Image (cartoon, grey):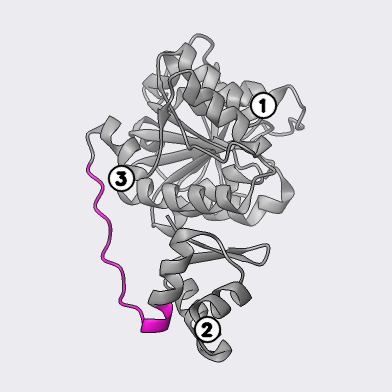
Amino acid sequence: MSAVRRITRRERDFPALLAAIHDPPPQLYVRGDASLGVLSQPAVAVVGARACSSYGRSVTRSLARDLAAAGLVVVSGLARGIDGEAHRGALAAGGTTVAVLGCGIDRDYPAAHAELARRIRETGLVVSEYAEGTEPAPWRFPARNRIIAGLCRATVVVEARSGALITADFALEEGRDVLAVPGEITSSLSAGTNALLGLGATPVTGAADVLELFDLEYVRAPAASLGPVADELLARLRDAPLTADELVRGAGVDSGDGSAALMELELAGRVVLEDGVYRASV
């Protein structure tokens, strides 16, 4: 286990934004190879439901990747679903991400994300207000969410249930910006985010909507050129998610050529596959 550092509110390294909230933690325990200064860098929280859709996963990973590539620190809670995808997206960009735990700093929770936590610690930080040996408990996670919001100037919510909405509430109480990714009106996973939009949250249709708050410009990396079959399949996926069979039949291409083109698109990061359905990356 990497060494644990402890910083209190009285110390210079304690992040000023977090110290300014209504109920700041008395101390933070920190693991990771990054400087403590990371906690004071411009940061955005990306949070959402544990039981998320493939659309939510794809949007979150792409959004976090672009935000991290632009220089923002991506903060989330290491939970399954949207949180995990936010961390993975930031890591894919070679950026910095911070995971905030709702248990002792010596626990990688959930255990399924132990490897993800290790990768985060290589270039970023894992933090908790709880010392070693503190077990996870349901009431600790809402308390954890105030730290996620408190470290950041803005919070982005994707497919919200109770936990993510609590984080958004903390951000609103502190006068921080809250943004939400619009979702399908027929999906229960979208009820929370669509409600936030109705209350005045800023809609997120891409990284530029978030970066504007930080006076940063979104510059899309030039996309690698694709073969003609891959181009055709990608154009169809921009209209709607489809299975491989639907793509091949709709495009009228040979199944072998279609499979090769889909592999080309996956390797280029232009599409994602989940539950047997392909989606164009944001």
Q: CA distance from mark 2 to mark 1?
A: 41 Å
> For the magenta stretch, what is the residue range?
217-230
Q: CA distance from mark 2 to mark 3?
A: 37 Å
Badge 3 density bin: few <14, some 14–19, many ≥20, Cα 10 Å: some
Secondary structure found at label 3: loop
Query: Measuring 50% from the left and 89% from the top, which residue is drawn there?
Result: 257
Secondary structure found at label 1: helix
Q: Does residue 55 belong to the magenta stretch?
A: no
216 with respect to 196 (left or right): left
- Relative to 177, does residue 92 appear above or below in the rendering? below
Front-lying residue, 239 or 189: 239
- Relative to 46, does residue 24 appear above or below in the rendering? above
Secondary structure found at label 2: helix
Identify the amino acid type marked 3: Gly
Spot occupied by residue 102 in the image (x, y as percentages of width and height)? 66, 31
Spot occupied by residue 105 in the image (x, y as percentages of width and height)? 63, 36
Q: Which residue is mark 1?
A: 162
Front-lying residue, 161 or 231: 231
Q: Which residue is mark 3?
A: 71
Q: How many marks?
A: 3
